Image: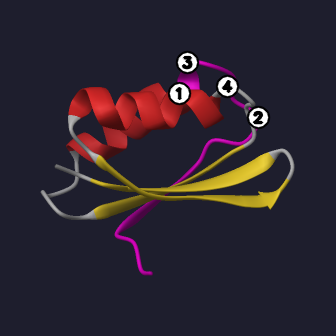
């Protein structure tokens, strides 16, 4: 899958990965996809919850080798 923007949130702890992703998503058009790479263990819970609360679609959550995960988020 292709994406429109990418955020490297490695090394950032909760709540920074989600806050930075939120800001990036605001700059995207509806339907565009943000790719986030994060290594904060809380992100496994935070990103699905954030997407559910904000109405964005969590397209995928992929383990890149613990503790790194890739999140693809489609803006509502």
In front: 12, or 40? 40
Please say if the residues under marks 2 and 4 sit with CB atoms less than 8 Å apart. Answer: no
Marks 1/4 in contact by CB < 8 Å: the verdict is: yes
Which label was assigned to residue 46? 1
Q: Is residue 75 above or below residue 15?
A: below
- Rate crowding at label 1 as few (under 14), some (14 to 19) or many (20 or more) other CA atoms within 10 Å: some
For marks 1 and 2, the one nearer the N-term is 2
**Picture quadrant where residue 54 is located:** top left
Marker disc for residue 42: 4
Q: How is the image coloured?
A: secondary structure
Q: Which class describes the residues within 10 Å of circle 4: few (<14), some (14-19), or many (20+)?
A: few
Callout 1 touching callout 3 (CB < 8 Å): yes
- Label 1 or label 3, whichever comes before in sequence order: 3
Looking at the rendered image, the disc whose residue lies closer to the viewer, 2 or 3, is 3
Secondary structure under badge 4? loop
Residue 73 location (% of width, % of height): 38, 54
Please tell me the numbered disc located at residue 11: 2
Residue 58: which numbered mark, if any? none
Q: Is residue 68 visible?
A: yes
At a point 63% along the width and 36% down the height, the residue shown is 44
Label located before the other in sequence (2 or 4)? 2
Gap in angstroms between the C-alphas marked 1 and 3: 8 Å
Q: Residue at position x 53%, y 27% from top?
A: 46
Q: Residue at x 31, y 33 (%)?
A: 52
Q: Earlier in the sequence, mark 3 or mark 4?
A: 3
Give the label, 2 or 4, closer to the camera. 4
Q: Which residue is mark 3?
A: 15
The quarter of the image holding the N terminus is bottom left
Q: Which segment is the magenta one? A: 1-16
Secondary structure of residue under mark 1: helix
Q: Position of residue 2 (x, y in %)?
A: 42, 80
Looking at the image, residue 76 sits to the left or right of residue 23; the answer is left
């Amino acid at each position: 899958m292709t994406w429109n923007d990418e955020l490297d949130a490695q090394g950032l702890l909760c709540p920074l990965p989600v806050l930075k992703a939120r800001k990036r998503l605001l700059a995207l058009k509806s339907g565009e996809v943000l790719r986030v790479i994060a290594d904060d263990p809380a992100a496994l819970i935070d990103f699905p919850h954030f997407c559910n609360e904000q109405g964005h679609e969590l397209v995928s959550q992929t383990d890149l080798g613990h503790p790194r995960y890739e999140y693809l988020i489609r803006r509502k």
